[in-house]
Amino acid sequence: MTIKDAEKLTGLTLKSIRYYEEKGLINIERNEENDYRNYTEEDIERLKLIKVLRYLDFSIEDISLMFKNDNVKESLTEKSKVLEKESSNYLEKQSICESLLKDYKKKKFTDVINDYSETIEFLESEDGKAVKNEFKEKSFANMLFMTAFRNLTFIKTEVLPLFVKK
């Protein structure tokens, strides 16, 4: 297959395909008669994998190392854990934004900020991290935690006392 065929089959640009070759992520055999690149099915699959890995924000260097060390599965496992943690952090922050918006008009904003400041301080403490980790270990953990977090009063009066050691 030619580089044009590879472009069509992978959705990558010619420039990207050449760049990945230049960086050593793919080694394309050349046709001895005309010195054109000759792409195999395996090359196409590898280019598709590179495309997906780049979409997942793996750097060229990371991809090169994972191919060199043959640890694609391990790298994907680690990335999945990182993305899960980031997702949890974004959900937590989104929940705070939604709650702030909801409470913004109900009472003095300085009171709202003070309430959330105290809650964030707790969540960043060792006790708060323990509570979050305990929730995350459960099957519906994160969703329950975020739902509970939306009601600050509920957390302060009902949930936190259950977990905070005195």
Image (tube, grey):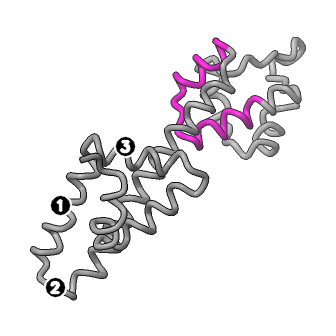
Q: Position of residue 95 (x, y in %)?
A: 38, 67
**On screen, 13 above or below 111?**
above
Residues rendered magenta in the picture: 46-69
* Nearer mark to the viewer, of 2 and 3: 3
As drawn, 71 above or below 83: above
* Mark 2–mark 3 distance (CA, rounded to whole Å): 31 Å
Give residue 22's position: percent from left, percent from top: 61, 20
The residue pinned by badge 2 equals 107
- As rendered, which of 45 and 117 lies closer to the eye? 117
- Examine the image and state in which quarter residue 2 appears: top right
SS for tag 3? helix
Residue designated by label 1? 117
Q: Is residue 65 above or below residue 140?
A: above
Who's the residue at 73% across and 32% down the image? 47
Label 1 or label 2, whichever comes before in sequence order: 2
Amino acid, disc 1: Ser
Figure quadrant of the N terminus: top right
